[in-house]
Image (cartoon, rainbow, N blue to C red):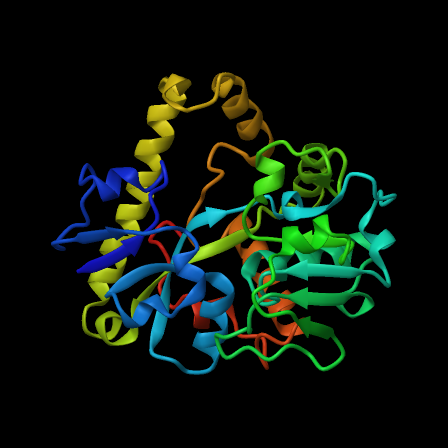
Amino acid sequence: MNLALADYDRTRPLIEGHVKPEGIALKVNTAWIGDFCVRPVYEEYDAAEFSLSWYVAARTRGEPVVALPVFPLRMPVLAYLFCRSDAPYSCPADLIGKKIAAPCYRFTVNLWLRGMLKEHFGLAPEQVEWITGAPEGAGYVPPANVKITLKLGSKAEDLLERGEVDAIMVPVLPRPFVEGEIWIRRLFRDCRAETRSFVTRTGIHPITHTVVMKQSLFDRHPWAAQSLAQAFVAAQKASDDFYARDPKHLGLSEAVFCLEEERAIYGKNRWSHGIDGPNRKVLETFVRYAHEQGYIARRPDLEELFPMDLPAN
């Protein structure tokens, strides 16, 4: 089985062969995280990590792909909304009537952010003008009541630096922010506190990627899907146990405190798989946001999107 996957600490035991799916000779192809958001990788591999928003849309359109109840990537998406440091904005509602740039409107991080900003922070997608740098792709057509201007080839952070937009919504940290340039900041001034408050209040730790398999392979060998899913669970546990015992291996000087803080907020199993428990609310919220934002024409049950669950569930 050919599997495409990003190299995370929680998947490395699978990538390096320390964890093996029972009955499967697995060849793992590692790739940059963004590769799983820009093309239908399920056409190239037997199984692959994949954008959750693209998968939900493809599945409801009847494309030959099915997801395992495995979620290799979650993100604190509030941390990916930026503005200029000299901007007077203190909350998302301050952006009503303003311009927000994004590489694409459809990215999963953006879907989560728009849904959360509308439901919890008073800013609806139709209340701003969106500036994008590339066509949407993935078969996605944005809602007619949302104003989107395509500036082909533009970079969101460049537009923000020149003052052509008021904020940016991006799936990766902007280079100027990473390099410490003082003109750019997060919209939420204490984003870590805001994120923790949101998680505590709602129980939602946003899932952005799942793992998909060719429908034909899933139909012929359902046991292989279960075996692969269980291997992800085992790799996650191996990673959690390793860093819990010895957090010095993480590239953070205060890793021991970071892990303790995360466990206190997200629980011991903060990277949990399966569609029940806390994940059910997260996934149902995501499907609702996807429907509201025009990614899907109807709201499927989770059992349609994830026809196989883990045995414990």
Give the side of residue 157 with respect to residue 63, left or right.
right
- Disc tally is 0
Which residue is depicted at the point 64% across and 69% down?
151
Q: Is residue 222 left or right of residue 296?
A: left
The residue sitting at the front extreme is: 162
- Image location (x, y in percent) of residue 286: 59, 61
In the rendered image, the quadrant that contains the N terminus is bottom left
- Asked if one can make out residue 23 in the rendered structure from this viewpoint, the answer is yes
Q: Quadrant of residue 262?
A: top right
Q: Nearer the viewer, residue 205 or 267?
A: 205
In this rendered view, identify the residue nearer to me: 58 or 147: 147
Answer above or below: position of 238 versus 259.
Answer: below
Answer above or below: position of 57 versus 268: below
- Residue at 29%, 72% in the rendered image: 43
The image shows residue 200 at horizontal and vertical percentages of 68, 39
- Within the image, what quadrant is residue 266 found in? top right
The x and y percentages for residue 14 are: 24, 43
Which sits in the foreground, 258 or 280?
258
User: Residue 37: percent from the left, percent from the top?
Assistant: 45, 62
The residue under the point 83% across, 40% down is 86
Q: Quadrant of residue 180?
A: top right
Q: Is residue 169 visible?
A: no
